[in-house]
Image (spheres, rainbow, N blue to C red):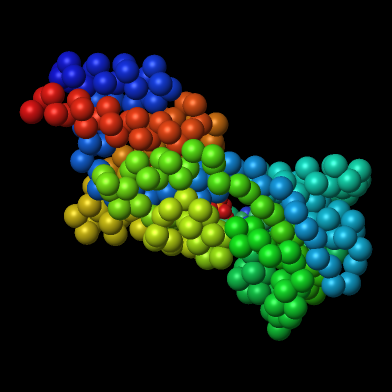
Amino acid sequence: AAPVSILIATALAAKKGILFKDGGAMETLAKVDRLLFDKTGTLTEGKPRLKAIQTTRYSKAYLLRMAAAVERQSAHLLAEAIMEAAEKQGIVVPEATGTMEIPGGGVQGLVEGKQVRVGHRQWIESAAGEASDMDAIFGELPADAAATVLYVTIEGRHSGALLLSDTLRSEAAEVVAKLKPAAKLSIVTGDQPTPAYAIARQAGIEEVRAGCSPERKAAVVEEERRGGHIVAFVGDGNNDAAALAAADVGIAMGGGAGAAMQVGDIVLARNSLSGIADAFRLSKAALKNIK
Ligand code: ADP
Ligand code: MG
């Protein structure tokens, strides 16, 4: 049976909306020295908004309409933001057929007989096979380092870019400062280096691994564990499920994807990062009482 101090700490944590699934997680958390964070929806609010549209050959409304048609099939936060923007502008979004989502890449499909792709630069470049004049498109976008830029091709031709911006959670910097003495912190994200480093700077985190597929996120966790670290991963998405499962302690943001909450050892029911600092404090206090 779990020592009484663990049971008490678990109950105290639950009152703060920090749900430990078992006493083992409480014991392991006290020993964690490596803390890896997903970016989107974990360090950021996870409510990206469409801030700007840049087009090369069509109207902005047409570009958004075509992008929204393929994104309707996706459950990604970026897809939601694009749908929301289209709705706000009163755009009637056409049906897309043959849609396919490439996790960590983008989405494609046929809209009104035209092939449409929306995704990040690398994926678009590899999928489109057209020599890119993307810097020209990018250069005219408003400077917002933290923003995620999605590129759109129609019939394989670069047609525009969508700039989406998400904001750092209000509690993030304070929580990071509290956790720094206990563990080395990093961001491990599927997003590109530019927005990843911008959010890292705002949060006070030095190390960044960008462009990570869900498998890569889990591999980073494994590498750190092989390096002798006790690793906690904090995430919110389906794309974090493998990393959460691989970690010594998986910490899932409440309000995130079901898969993340299912595999997480700890669920932050209040959907706030503050729970992590509280969880560390409680676990260390509980362990001290056992020894
Ligand atoms: P994250 O949630 O950390 O951004 P993902 O692995 O879900 O990580 O996605 C990585 C990147 O792949 C996104 O930042 C985006 O550029 C691109 N991407 C993923 N899904 C979509 C989608 N449905 N539409 C457009 N781009 C996408
Ligand atoms: Mg996420």
Compared to residue 162, the image places residue 178 above or below, namely: above
Q: Position of residue 282 (x, y in %)?
A: 27, 27
What residue is at 88 percent from the left and 49 percent from the top? 94
* Residue at the extreme left: 291
Give the quarter the ligand 1 occupies: bottom right
Q: Nearer the viewer, residue 56 or 96?
A: 56
What residue is at 47 percent from the left and 50 percent from the top? 203
What residue is at 8 percent from the left and 28 percent from the top? 291
Q: Position of residue 217 (x, y in %)?
A: 42, 55
Q: Where, by quadrant of the figure, is residue 102 drawn?
A: bottom right
Q: Where, by quadrant of the figure, is residue 252 drawn?
A: top left
Q: Is residue 26 left or right of residue 49?
A: left
Q: Position of residue 230 (x, y in %)?
A: 24, 47
Q: Is residue 102 left or right of residue 14?
A: right
Q: Is residue 113 visible?
A: no
Q: Where, by quadrant of the figure, is residue 132 drawn?
A: bottom right
> In what quadrant of the picture does the N terminus appear?
top left
* Residue at the extreme bottom: 131
Q: Is residue 31 visible?
A: yes
Compared to residue 34, the image places residue 192 above or below, namely: below
Count of marks placed on residues: 0
What residue is at 72 percent from the left and 71 percent from the top? 138
Compared to residue 216, the image places residue 179 above or below, namely: above
Q: Nearer the viewer, residue 97 or 192?
A: 192
Q: Position of residue 8 (x, y in %)?
A: 25, 16
Q: Nearer the viewer, residue 289 or 82?
A: 289
Q: Is residue 172 left or right of residue 70?
A: left
Q: Is residue 84 left or right of residue 62?
A: left
